[in-house]
Amino acid sequence: MTALHSPSDSSGHTEELSSLPLLLDVRSVARLVGCSTKHIRRMVRAGKLPTPVKVGRLTRWSRASLESWIAAGCKLAAPEGGGR
């Protein structure tokens, strides 16, 4: 599988989706997409990113939903429940 956006660690290696956990936190999603965590949260509110899931008090994104979103060309997601 090829790397997305090419987020790099200090050694210059890129992350591949297959090496990521099944549920991703906001920092991992931001690295994957190539933007800030604040921008990820704005994208969710605007319905431009798959809706995260709550695991207790934690907010996580399904790796599968992000893979599908990316494969579909990062098309706008339909906001659930009318936004906020």
Image: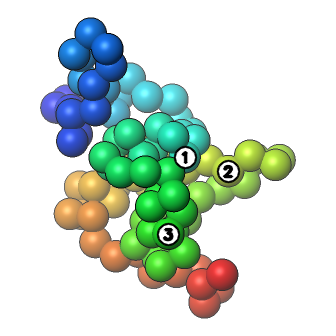
Residue 22 position within the rendered picture, expressed as x and y whole percent measured from the top left: 52, 35
Residue at 31% over, 46% down: 34
Among numbered discs 1 and 2, the one appearing first in the sequence: 1
Q: Which mark is residue 59?
A: 2
Q: Is residue 21 depicted above or below 65 in this figure?
A: above
What kind of element bears circle 3? helix
Q: How is the rendered protein coloured?
A: rainbow
Front residue (pair 26, 81)? 26
In the image, residue 61 lies at what x, y percent? Answer: 55, 50
Q: Label 1, on which residue?
A: 26
Whole-Å distance between the Cαs marked 3 and 1? 12 Å
Q: Earlier in the sequence, mark 3 or mark 1?
A: 1
Decide: few, some or many residues near mark 3? Use Cα within 10 Å; few <14, some 14-19, many ≥20. Answer: few
Q: Amino acid at mark 1?
A: Val
Query: Tag on residue 42?
Result: 3
Label 2 CA crowd tier, 10 Å (few <14, some 14–19, many 20+): some
Looking at the image, residue 3 sits to the left or right of residue 44; the answer is left
Do the CB atoms of the residues marked 1 and 2 lie less than 8 Å apart? yes
62 relative to 33 in the view: left or right: right
Determine crowd level at label 1: few under 14, some 14-19, many 20+ residues with C-alpha closer than 10 A: some
